[in-house]
Image (spheres, grey):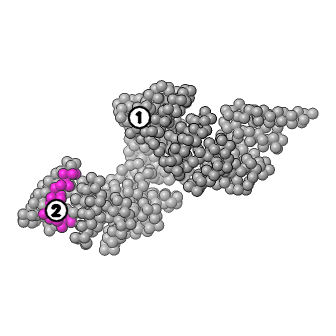
Amino acid sequence: MRKISRISYMMTKKLKAISFWSLLFFVTPVLSCVAVEGDYFQSEDMNLSGGIARQEDDALRDAYQSYALACIAILNGDYQQGEIHLKEALKNDEHSPYLLKKVSHVLLEQGKGEEALRFAQKAVKDHPGDIDAKKCLAGIYSQLQRFELAISQYREILMGDPENKEARLQLSTLFIRLKDFDSALGHLAILIEDDPELLIAHYYVGRVNLERDDYGSAEKAFLRVLEINPEFLPALFDAAVLYGKMDKLDRAIECYERILMISPGNTTASERLISLLYETGQDKAAEEAIAEMEKNLSPGDRERKTLGFIYLKYGKLDESISELTSIVAAFPEDQEARYYLGAALDEHEDFDAAYENLSLLGPESKYFVHARIRMAYILQRQGKTDEAIELLREAVNLKQGHPRLYLMLSTLYEGREQYQAAMSVLKEGLTHDARDTGLLYRMGIVLDRLKRNKECLEHMEIILTIDPTHADALNYIGYTYADKGIHLDRAQEFIEKALKYKPDSGYIIDSLGWVYFQKGLYDRALIELKRAVKLTPEDPVINEHLGDVYTKVKQYERALETYNRALVLENADQEKLKQKIKGVIEHLKGESR
């Protein structure tokens, strides 16, 4: 009997549907990069109906035998066979709440959600007072994304058992998932009032407030979590993210350093720490962190590919290629490492090796589209535009409907001034998704190239009906008005709105400067255009605009210097700039007389 009880216990641990893990990852696992361990709630009752181990009649003995066989099958990972035995057990004990719940779990494990739901519903119907059956049903509703029904079940549990922590916590996670943060915080407050040391409740309060950009409340909650358990890694990760958002980078660095003291081999923490150290100008400390990371990763360790990514990010191409080459040699199926090896070789200008590695990523790979686009760029830079177009055409046939392929293909046609061909490609892409703002924006640009300005503006306005925050469309409309000297107040509104979403865009700042120029506000125009040139020094039009302002304010020497700088930039309007340079020289001659 003890042996059978042990099997029952192990199976229940295997099948436990509502656990701390599921609670943590049910919310939004984006910010935290570690698993959470802990058993916060008691296991449910292991007995079959009426206490199967205590019954002597034949039916219950047969049920128990089938149940024992199900346990063995499940422990061996054979859920299908486990399902068969559990259903056989139910034939002999059809109202057993335990068997009904267990077969629901096994079905859910196999992806048979609807069938699992039917068994869970029967368990609740047959045993309306069984809280665990209601939890099981609520959990399945959640899995099937029938959140209102899940909420209803948890509320029903809490009506009968207000002290049920697990049900209240699960209800909180549902409200978080539905972005009903006020309701979530209300239930979390009840949990904390009942148990001030309930770490997970404080943690969720922090996560909710981080999501709501209430950084002060989030910080307070995370600090409370770390007071309860100083080594709780999810809170340390999220606190680091929080401090990054608050621009308290030293505090973020401290969090990652604490994580690495607790978990020295945590590559995610190492990667983020190194990035922050470089970002804050602590290059020597960053190099030391890389060296420490290397010590914790032995040669041949698959995690060393993270080193390859870090080296690539910071321009250490030889080191990146070395690390990633070792990874793909040991793990040829590692498509991520293969793609970034190709990227590193491409940046190293070893185009043939880059192309060869990227070509190994087939249509089944999630990196296929990125690889084909990079391969097309390689061919374009080698002057093989026809081959690049053919390559992308093949990729489009294999991955129809992927917008980035259509965008890249249209860009190749634009580069050859084949605007009608570019239009055809974009129209083809829009047949798969007429609301894709990337394709619509590119179509607007092509219409602009064809001097079809009215249609271009119509496309930009369509984009804003789909995405009112589309900064490039806002900027395009604003700049078009500014360039024509019309609707200048409205132009300024569009551009200032665009800057909310892209505050460091040299192009949008240039547009604002140009509005001021057209309004005759030259001092303000000068401030914005100098900033735009600093951000985007290689754009000839932005430099030309700055030269125009210098000319207006009669700073002719600076105007001449700026026009000459614009003249040598790629795609500069040579004739226009030469005329302006000639005019400035005349002004300078007039001043010298």
On screen, residue 222 above or below 266: below
- Looking at the picture, which amino acid does disc 1 mark? Leu
Report the span colored magenta: 79-98
Say which residue appears at 52% left-offset and 50% top-offset: 434
- Looking at the picture, which amino acid does disc 2 mark? Leu
Where the N terminus falls, by quadrant? bottom left
Residue 361: give its label. Answer: 1
Residue 227: give its label. Answer: none
* Mark 1 surroundings within 10 Å by alpha-carbon count, few (fewer than 14), some (14 through 19), many (20 or more): many
Number of marks drawn: 2
Where the C terminus falls, by quadrant? top right
Observer-nearest of 191 and 541? 541
Say which residue appears at 43% left-offset and 39% top-offset: 398
Say which residue appears at 40% left-offset and 35% top-offset: 362
Q: In which quarter of the image is residue 550?
A: top right
Circle 1 SS class = loop
Mark 1 and mark 2 residues within 8 Å of each other at the beta carbon: no
- Mark 1 or mark 2: whose residue is earlier in sequence: 2
Residue topped by disc 2: 90
Observer-nearest of 563 and 167? 563
